[in-house]
Image (cartoon, coloured by chain):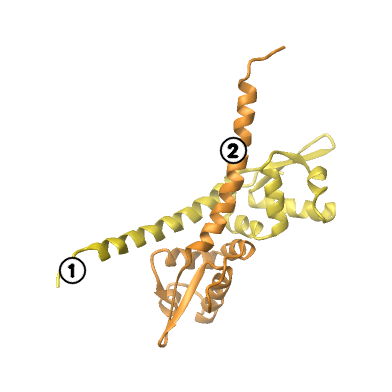
Chain colours: A orange, B yellow
Amino acid sequence: MPRKKPDIDRVFHALGDPTRRAIMERLSQGPISVSRLAEPLAITLAAVVQHLQVLEESGLVQTEKVGRVRTCHIEPAGLSVAAQWIADRRTMWERRLDRLGDLLAEPDEK
Amino acid sequence: MPRKKPDIDRVFHALGDPTRRAIMERLSQGPISVSRLAEPLAITLAAVVQHLQVLEESGLVQTEKVGRVRTCHIEPAGLSVAAQWIADRRTMWERRLDRLGDLLAEPDEK
């Protein structure tokens, strides 16, 4: 499958599932074949493949087939998109709190 | 509604919807009443209330009713849970790349 551009709706949706987060956790340790990835997960190989498809379509994971073995690895751009969105919200929120703090610290002019 | 402990499944699911992200974007500028929040959104007030419920149940937003006005604001703990999960994955991934870089930089002993 060609590399997918991260889609923020799909990234957050994909991360909302505990099995898909478990897959991401395993992949953050390094690339792995689909069959080895499936071993510790208490679901069928077909279900793992479906979850991988969701992760791949969101731009969080890439898979490559070499010979008969399909290997998957994290695509860092997907996580970056989500991290950036969250960071932007927190920055705005914290700036607002800072301004509020400045206002409260101003001497009372009454 | 009492303050909800952030639930990571619900947090990511909640953020996977563009209207809910638009609400979070507005709320990151400061607290606002539900009716003023709904004004620029091209959906019914009832739909806004439903989205707010999802955000509140995930621990991303808190609402408070004072008299007849319900006001909503960001609950930073929810965003922190999501940010931390992503940061942990990226750290592991980057450490792995560093180790790989070290291996490649080692003098060839053949």
Q: Position of residue A21 (x, y in %)?
A: 51, 64
In which quadrant of the rendered view does residue A104 lie?
A: top right
Crowd around label 1: few <14 · some 14–19 · many ≥20 (10 Å) = few
Residue at the image point whose x is 43% and y is 66% from the top = A26
Q: Amino acid at mark 2?
A: Glu
Q: Position of residue A84 (x, y in %)?
A: 55, 53
Residue at the image point whose x is 64% and y is 52% from the top = B58
Q: Position of residue A69 (x, y in %)?
A: 41, 84
What element does badge 2 sit on? Answer: helix
Depicted B109 relative to depicted A94: above or below: below
Comparing A30 with B11, the one in front is: A30
Left or right: B41 in relation to A67: right
In the current view of this chain or complex, which residue is farthest to the top?
Answer: A110
> Which label sits in the foreground, 1 or 2?
1
Crowd around label 2: few <14 · some 14–19 · many ≥20 (10 Å) = some
Whether callout 1 and callout 2 share a subunit is answered no
Which chain does the numbered disc 1 sit on? B
| Picture disc at residue A94 | 2
Residue at the image point whose x is 56% and y is 48% from the top = A87
Which chain does the numbered disc 2 sit on? A
CA gap, disc 1 and disc 2: 50 Å
Left or right: B96 in relation to B24: left
Residue B61 visible in the picture: yes
Residue B2 visible in the picture: no
Q: Amino acid at mark 1?
A: Asp
Q: Position of residue B29 (x, y in %)?
A: 68, 41
Q: Quadrant of the C terminus of chain A?
A: top right
What element does badge 1 sit on? Answer: loop
In the current view of this chain or complex, which residue is farthest to the bottom?
Answer: A68
Comparing B64 with A6, the one in front is: A6
User: Which residue carries the number 1 mark?
Assistant: B108
